[in-house]
Amino acid sequence: MLFRSLAERLLARNDISYGLYIYHIPIINLMMYRGKMHQASDVAIAVVASLVLAAISWFALERPAIRLKRRSIHATAVTGPGALP
């Protein structure tokens, strides 16, 4: 429970996890190809670059795409008059 509230406070309901998952490997591979990733500062650069690209992806692509969705593919628990079977 502690980590959930910490994440909610830090990210304010912004979900950059998928972008981080997608972009971290290309960044690391590019840096390794260029002969980097031997120092702690190189790792810090990779982390920061991954976080920045993940945030850009969330705000520019993912969140707008999610807002375009009209309905979820998952059933919802709606009860009462007018509820679908």
Image (tube, rainbow, N blue to C red):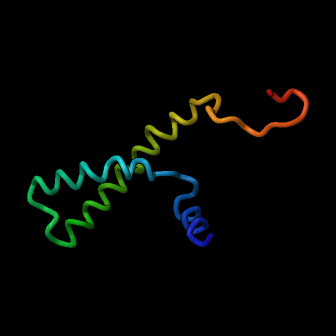
- Kindly identify the residue that appears in the image at 16 percent across and 56 percent down: 31
Left or right: residue 16 versus residue 5 is left
The quadrant of the image that shows the C terminus is top right
Coordinates of residue 5 in the picture (x, y in percent) = 61, 67
The quadrant of the image that shows the N terminus is bottom right
Residue 65 sits above or below residue 13 on the image: above
Coordinates of residue 6 in the picture (x, y in percent) = 56, 68
Left or right: residue 4 versus residue 85 is left
Q: Nearer the viewer, residue 29 or 54?
A: 29
- Kindly identify the residue that appears in the image at 60 percent across and 72 percent down: 2
- Kindly identify the residue that appears in the image at 25 percent across and 63 percent down: 45
Q: Residue furthest left?
A: 35
- Kindly identify the residue that appears in the image at 57 percent across and 30 percent down: 68
Left or right: residue 19 versus residue 9 is left
Coordinates of residue 12 in the picture (x, y in percent) = 57, 57
Q: Residue furthest right?
A: 81
Coordinates of residue 84 in the picture (x, y in percent) = 80, 27
Left or right: residue 31 versus residue 71 is left
Q: Nearer the viewer, residue 75 or 16?
A: 75
